[in-house]
Structures are given as C-alpha cells and as structure tokens.
Image: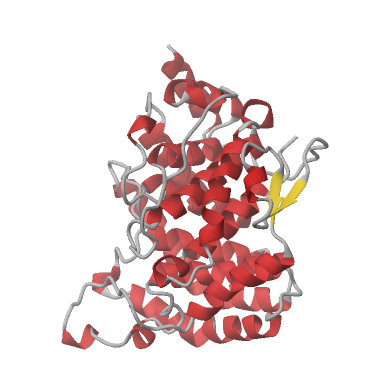
Amino acid sequence: MKKLLLASVCLLIFSCKGNSEDPGKNPGSTDTLITEDILPNVLKSTDRITLSIAEANNLAALPLGCLNTEYPNKLGQTLENAEAMDEPHVLHPAFYGCFDWHSSVHAHWSLVSLLKQFPNLDKNEEIREKLKTSLSQENIQGEVEYFKRKESMAYERTYGWAWLLKLSQELNSWEDPLGQELAANLQPLTDLITTRYIEFLPKLNYPVRVGEHTNTAFGLSFAYDYAEAVGNQELMEAVKKSAQNFFLNDDDCPVGWEPGGYDFISPCLAEIDIMRRVLPKSAFNLWIEDFMPQLKNEDFEMEVGEVSDRTDGKLVHLDGLNFSRAWIFSGLANQYPDKFGHLRNLANEHIAYSFPNVSGDDYEGGHWLGTFAIYALQKSGKQPVK
C-alpha cells in the first residue's frame, strides 16, 4: 500500500520542482575550522566544518600542481585506428593532466570553487591564468571534437559527464568576468554532454549500482544539480524520470554489505542522494521508510572506510568514500534538519578520518582526493533549509 501511495504522489508531482537547498538560518549551529589540533574534537560534533584560508591554499596546491602533469596518464580510450593514438595533451587539450580526464575536469572545478570561496588565495593570479589558458575556446573545441568521434560516444559515461556539468554549474554561478568567460567557452562541451545524457538515459534499462565511476545515482545527482541551476527543464525531467524508474520501488538497501574494497561511492547513500532531490518531502519520507529507515535513528552509526595503503590507487578509494558519504549525510541534514540533522556528526567523523591524508605526497590519491574533500566541506558548510 505504501508503495502504491508513493507512486501516486510521484505521479502527481512529476513535473513539479522538488525541494531545493536554499540557505536558511540555523541559530544552533557554529562553524569549525579544520586544523590538526581540533580534528579529534569534530568527531561526534554537529557543528558545521569550514575551511580556513591556510587550508584552502593547501588544497589549491593539489589541482594546481596536476593540471599540466601529463604523465602518468590513463587515457581510457577505444582506438578506432592507428591515427587515434597520440599524446594526452593532443587528444585532450583542456583536460589532459591529473592522471585521467575526469580527474582533470574536477581539478578545474576545485580551483574555481576555491577561488569563489577565497578570492585572496595566495596563488590567485596563477590559478586564474591557468584556468583561462586551459579552458580557452580552442581547447574546448578540441575536447568537443574528441567526444564526437564514433568510438567516443560512451567516453566518460557518466562519471566524467557528471563532473563536467558540475564544473559548468560552478562557472555559471561565479560572479566574476572570468567565470562568465570560461562558462561561455565551456558551453559547447556542456551542451554536448547534456545532449548525451538526454539521449542515453531512456536507453538505460537498469541502473548501475557499484561503488565506483559508473554508479548511476551519482551521475544523476550532479546532472540534476546542473539542470536545476541553469533551468534546463528537459534534462531535469529526464533525470527525474530515470531516478524514479530505477529506484522508486527499492526496499531494504543492504548497507551492511558496504563498503566494497575499492568503493569511493556508497551505492545505498548515492541512491538516497538522488531521491532526496527528485521527490517532494512527503514522498521522500515514505520512500526512505522502506529503503533505509535506520538513518532516522539519532544513534545511527556507520564506521569510516579504513585505508590500509595510500600508495595503492584502488585502496585509497576508501578515503574518497569517506568524503562522498560525508557530503550525502550533510545534504540530508541540510534539506531535512528535523529528521536528519544528527547525521552531521557522521559527516564530520568521516571528514576527520580522511582529511589529514589529502595533502600527502602520493600521487595516487593526491590527484583527486582534494576535490572530494572540498565538495564534502562545501556541503558541510551549507546552512540547513528552513
């Protein structure tokens, strides 16, 4: 009966806009800066965690250092012929650094996000120049041409697609002439990726529920955020329809099976993250009662993902898992503070475990973990919706 009621509610509101995360006032919360001496104290704390300028400078060094680091490089491409082989910077004039294409994309997002939050970063001018050079019209056109290759139709689907739209969203909302210039430069690739989503989603009969790049719920979440931010109704409706088709009837997510050894995304939580976006409050409350009702318990616990070897490119994924779990917990707490506000302590616990390891010297995690940390902290710092 509950599922029938939920389906009816969703049918009635399918074309309506869901709850957003507009800032509101939360007089009971305080800000906590992340520094090594206070990290133990953020465990079990519901305070919002924010970055200091010193920490932002440290985090900016990671993407700044890898944007033009061409090797080692994982191209992940299908070769249609011998002529398709070339060096990374030729194939991907904008996004060739940081080990792989999607990491380069979200490294650019990291720098834009940090500049927006901290206009007085130590290397402000260097960052702006690198972004302007990298995201030139000519370079983005080169990326478009690569994606239009016959063998590139599924390239970076949908993880890289999602981060490209997140970068576009960040640039579009940057009230700076450079941000608007770069957003315009990126738009042809943004439009292409948007079209790819709209064409692909109706063909995907079953969601991918793994804890790595191809996770469908993750790709849908970032695509929805972009579509909502820029008012792209066609993409929003495509994402809503797919998410509801895939996940509306899901029950009892086996969260006890998590994490997998290489996970950087929680399959259960990623599903919650997209459904809180596309369902109105009443429908979401019904849905999560069947899917993962234990989240509402104030004593709900989830152990952090423990990393045994941070020099191993796969094992270090678990640091990313801690950050992605944290941003999902924070997203729930922001949107529904009355029911999920207690999840801030879990978000803080997960951030506190992995944050000290973000700025290490090892490239296996260094080329991407900073992005996950920045996004987790960005979500943590949002004020809850009234």
Residue placed furthest toward the left: 81
How many discs appear? 0
Residue 251 vs residue 113: left or right?
left
Model colouring: secondary structure
**Image: 292 above or below 94:** above
Using the rendered view, name the quadrant where residue 135 is placed: bottom right
Q: Quadrant of the C terminus?
A: top right
> Foreground: 8 or 378?
378
Whether residue 260 is visible here, answered yes or no, is: yes
Q: Name the image quarter holding residue 292.
A: top left
Residue 266: x and y in percent read: 41, 43
Does 374 sit above or below residue 352? below
Q: Nearer the viewer, residue 149 or 126?
A: 126
State the image coordinates of residue 278 (x, y, percent, origin top left). Answer: 53, 38
Locate residue 275 relative to residue 82 in the image: left or right.
Answer: right
Q: Who is closer to the viewer here, 144 or 66?
A: 66
The residue sitting at the top extreme is 1
Residue 329 locus on image (x, y percent): 56, 39
Q: Can the viewer see residue 224 in this picture?
A: no
Task: Locate residue 33, reporting x and y percent.
Answer: 72, 54
Please give the name of the residue rendered at 63% of the width and 65% of the height, measured from the top-left corner.
113
Seen at 34% across and 63% down, the residue is 313
- Left or right of 17 in this view: 308: left
For the point 38% across and 86% down, which residue is it? Answer: 89
For residue 196, above or below residue 244: below
